[in-house]
Image (cartoon, rainbow, N blue to C red):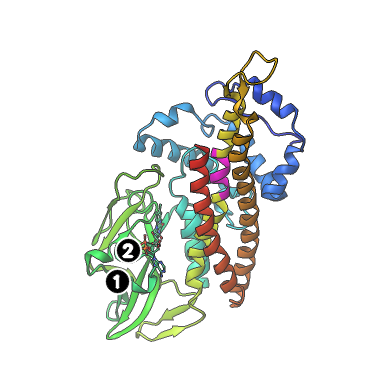
């Protein structure tokens, strides 16, 4: 762990404004201690370890050219970074991947842009590890870790997002062939939004209504191949595409997906909590609330990242307020004053900084609660889920609103 934090200057030639150097000299707190307070010691160490690797590596380090690239150019650069990471950290980061203990868990979020196929590890892997049965995990998880199989998480449909029970995609058991037939019966049943779905993944965890003859058993998760592993050609009876331009998050491949009587083996219904045998007999093995745990993981990331998403722009605003000067209002001084020295400006930025700290802290607390909940769910104990869900839902709403408002105020 370093004793001080390396100061980054301008992205192009790493120059630091002298005003910032002076301010840092006069600071009244220990910066490493502050990082530990914000991130926790283990995460701070993981971050520093990764920053060191990233900043000294020409493929991984930030570049000013990135900002002028088109979306496909950005995506290509990001894929090169993933490939580079795979080549150099294959064992630590990929083959031995553990979503709770991996050494640079946050590396996808610390490279410039948004990691392509980040959903694979963030949602796909976690969904598989949580919802599959032991046999499915033993077969599929090594393939996910080696990225032979790249999985997106296809839950939301055009017609239903929040209301998961209202999803319309059907998975009907064909007992004669021992297969499920996936179908999108309406326009509104089109899978809509999932990240990395149209081009970057070759499999999807698809949420669909399980139908056996006249019986319906609710929404269940299925592993569906969407593209060929070698060539990435789209599989038969599947249609998919990119959602098109967005205001932000450009390097993320948000897509749409439809099924036209697409067949998958019966064994690809994820069966950790409910299963169906080849005679069509349905059995509940556990609590279906486990399906919800994956969405909670994503909510956790939003809660956790909202603090960092606010911290970054307010950091820019604070730095700017130190180098930007307006009016020679100080008696005896010939230079204009830093805008940070005006109380009204400090009054604008101070609370935003404080909020971002508070949000990071609350995010850490939620992470710890989440890890505890997942451990208990594995033992079929759901007792902490309800309260954790309340915290996550409340914080997600509040923190994303604070982040948006804070960014606007800092602007
Ligand atoms: C960038 C991005 C990436 C995404 N990635 C994925 C992904 O990888 N996989 C995936 O499956 N999905 C993904 N989604 C979809 C996301 O999960 C849905 O957008 C989300 O579930 C909300 O659904 P919706 O957009 O249909 O909104 P709706 O359900 O239509 O809700 C819109 C608004 O209606 C109101 N509302 C709805 N229901 C209620 C209620 N019961 N009480 C009070 N108010 C209510 C709220 O104001 C809510 O914000 C992604 C979305 C985005 C924006």
Occupied quadrant, residue 32: top right
Label 1, residues with CA under 10 Å away: few <14, some 14-19, many ≥20 = many
Q: Which residue is mark 2?
A: 157
Q: In the image, is residue 295 above or below residue 8? A: below
Q: In the image, is residue 47 above or below residue 211? A: above
56 drawn magenta = no
- Is any atom of residue 107 visible in this view? no
Q: Residue at x 60, y 26 (%)?
A: 9
Which stretch is magenta? 307-313
- On the image, the x and y values in percent for residue 55 come to 59, 32
Q: In the image, is residue 383 above or below residue 107? A: below
Q: CA distance from mark 2 to mark 1?
A: 8 Å
- On the image, the x and y values in percent for residue 44 come to 68, 45
Whether ligand 1 has any atom under 8 Å from the Cβ at mark 2 is answered as yes
Q: Residue at x 43, y 79 (%)?
A: 275
Residues 213 and 246: in front is: 246
Element marked by disc 2: loop
Q: Which label number is shown at residue 168?
A: 1
Name the side, left or right, on which 240 lies relative to 373: left
């Amino acid at each position: 762990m370093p004793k001080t934090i390396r100061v980054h200057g301008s992205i192009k030639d790493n120059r630091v404004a002298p005003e910032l150097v002076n301010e840092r000299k006069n600071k009244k707190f220990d910066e490493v201690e502050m990082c530990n307070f914000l991130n926790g010691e283990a995460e701070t160490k993981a971050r520093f370890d990764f920053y060191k690797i990233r900043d000294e590596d020409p493929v991984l380090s930030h570049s000013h050219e990135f900002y002028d690239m088109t979306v496909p150019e950005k995506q290509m650069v990001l894929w090169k970074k993933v490939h580079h990471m795979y080549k150099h950290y294959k064992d630590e980061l990929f083959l031995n991947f553990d979503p709770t203990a991996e050494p640079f868990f946050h590396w996808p979020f610390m490279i410039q842009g948004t990691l392509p196929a980040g959903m694979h590890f963030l949602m796909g892997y976690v969904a598989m590890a949580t919802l599959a049965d032991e046999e499915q995990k033993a077969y599929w998880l090594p393939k996910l870790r080696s990225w032979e199989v790249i999985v997106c998480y296809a839950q939301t449909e055009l017609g239903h997002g929040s209301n998961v029970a209202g999803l319309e995609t059907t998975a009907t058991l064909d007992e004669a062939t021992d297969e499920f037939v996936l179908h999108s019966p309406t326009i509104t049943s089109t899978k809509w939004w999932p990240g990395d779905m149209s081009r970057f993944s070759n499999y999807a965890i698809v949420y669909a209504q399980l139908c056996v003859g006249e019986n319906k058993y609710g929404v269940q998760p299925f592993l569906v191949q969407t593209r060929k592993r070698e060539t990435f050609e789209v599989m038969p009876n599947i249609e998919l595409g990119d959602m098109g331009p967005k205001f932000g998050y450009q390097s993320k491949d948000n897509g749409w997906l439809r099924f036209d009587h697409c067949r998958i083996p019966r064994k690809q219904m994820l069966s950790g909590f409910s299963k169906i045998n080849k005679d069509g007999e349905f059995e509940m093995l556990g609590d279906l609330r486990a399906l919800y745990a994956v969405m909670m993981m994503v909510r956790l990331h939003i809660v956790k990242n909202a603090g960092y998403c606010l911290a970054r722009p307010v950091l820019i605003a604070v730095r700017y307020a130190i180098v930007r000067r307006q009016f020679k209002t100080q008696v005896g001084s010939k230079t204009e004053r830093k805008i940070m020295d005006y109380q009204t400006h400090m009054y604008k930025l101070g609370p935003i900084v404080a909020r971002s700290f508070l949000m990071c802290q609350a995010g850490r607390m939620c992470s710890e609660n989440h890890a505890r909940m997942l451990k208990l769910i594995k033992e079929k104990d759901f007792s902490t889920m309800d309260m954790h869900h309340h915290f996550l839902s409340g914080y997600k709403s509040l923190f994303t609103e604070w982040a948006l408002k804070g960014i606007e105020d800092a602007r």
